Amino acid sequence: MDTSTPPPYDLLGVGIGPFNLSLAALAEPVPGLRTLFCDQRPEFRWHPGMLVDGARMQVPFLADLVSLVDPTSPWSFLNYLRDQDRLFPFYFAERFQLPRREYDHYCRWAAERLANCRFGTEVTALHWEAPWYRAELTDTATGRRSEVRARNLALGVGTRPVLPEAFAALAGHPRAFHSAEYLDRRADLAGARDITVVGSGQSGAEVFLDLLRRHEGDDVRLRWLTRTRALAPMEYSKLGLEHFTPDYTRYFHGLPAAVRDALVTAQWQLHKAASAETLAEIHDHLYERTIGRPIDAAPVEITPGTAVDAARPGPCGGLELHCRHTDSGAEHLLRTDAVVLATGYRAARPAALEPLAELIDWDEAGRYRVDQDHRVATRPGLTGGLYVQNAELHTHGVGTPDLGLGAHRAAVILNAVTGRTVHRLPGRTAWTGFAPPGPAGPADQPTSAGPVEQPTPAGPVEQPTPAVPRPQELTRAATVGR
């Protein structure tokens, strides 16, 4: 192990997905701020298994790494286009939503040029040794180990694919896999005469559409099962989108925990549904396919309101899905050759955090307690800042995984870490007033995400971190994504 100890960083980022990459980009020009972001992968990759030809983002191009906070930044998407000599092609394309492959390329462009991003470096363990965090690093190519110190941490390790319990018996099966692996495993579907897609979100719709295009006229039966009762499109009205503003995030954060949990489930159409455009493309494809033929001539089944209670390998090959119609309760056995599980993602605790686990103030469900600045509540002995990105759906609402709020969250974290207004943020961002009217006391006033006095300012690199009270969960009864 390399025993040399460099000066402490003001902020260490664990993982480099779009959100920590945004934080790296906004931190890069801040004078005197020492930051480092590490990722075990050899290069930036964004959902590589779902970069299907023709798939587009569900947010406008302004939801890039920096523009909604600092449109003058050299890391904006427009500056990327300028660097790639693509400004005029983009201008004539007249599309607000980018191809997914272009967003991935843009992020790789930024990640390769930001000096504070280090790939091929795994953060294997995090320790608290007051007044610093000590991080153990491993070079994934050479195995060489080293250590760094930091005043603050930003966890941006992303989410992990969810394999529902009903499909546990199919784990590792060559023809049953999550949509996150779709492009890498699509060849495994060769020879299958019956393919089932499970899940009604955007990933499920994109996989089903891609399979429709690839199996035109070859009599392969394609099936789309969804537990939801309808293939309703994602909410995309202009006022509906105001749920993805800092205003709604602040309102949501002030609700009791039980209300927040219920809302996340009830608001599935804001952040888990498929886009109307993708659903329309599926319908258009089926319409064209059946010209001059009966509708049921195409070997296609779309069945909402159907839950899979159990799945297992079939006794004679293939797979068996034990299904239940959610309205009638009727059960049936479905046999298929392959299953693609578009069953979503879930935040997971990184293994490197285990040495700190007893110093974190988990909620009753074992989740982070997160304040409005995205700082995790910790026990009194841990005074360094611990921030999370895309692990606070339960405290910050449906906008948590939304790229449109990524730059704003990164700026809030930077302002909190430095203890000053590094990036000026707007006080109000929505026409909608989410809270009921009533007497406004100090606790009920909407708070700007601007300067907030924080316990761990960057400051001179050798200054210790002062202790402060841990953030508390807000439960004001008065203030009862994509």
Image (tube, helix red, strand yellow):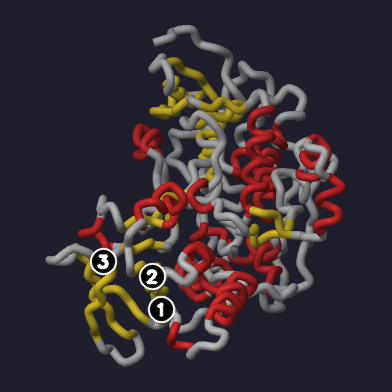
Q: Nearer the viewer, residue 206 or 126?
A: 206
User: To which residue does mark 2 refer?
Assistant: 220
Mark with earlier residue (1, 2): 2
Residue at 53% x, 45% y: name it: 388
Q: In 3D space, how far apart are the residues under numbered discs 1 and 2 (Cα atoms)?
A: 7 Å
Instruction: Give the left or right position of residue 85, taking residue 254 as reference.
Output: right
Q: Residue furthest left?
A: 315
Q: In 3D space, how far apart are the residues under numbered discs 3 and 1 (Cα atoms)?
A: 26 Å
Percent x, y of residue 156: 53, 41
Residue 299: mark in rendering: 1
User: Mark 2 and mark 1 in contact (Cβ < 8 Å)?
Assistant: yes
Q: Secondary structure at mark 1?
A: loop
Instruction: Give the left or right position of residue 305, taking residue 407 as reference.
Output: left
Question: In the rendered view of the protein, which quadrant contains the N terminus?
Answer: top left
Asked if 410 appears above or below 150 in the picture, the reply is: below
Three-letter residue code for mark 2 = Val
Three-letter residue code for mark 3 = Ala
Residue at 66% x, 54% y: name it: 99
Percent x, y of residue 393: 51, 58
Asked if 222 appears above or below 349 in the picture, the reply is: below
User: To which residue does mark 3 refer?
Assistant: 166
Three-letter residue code for mark 1 = Pro
Percent x, y of residue 416: 66, 40
Residue at 49% x, 60% y: name it: 394
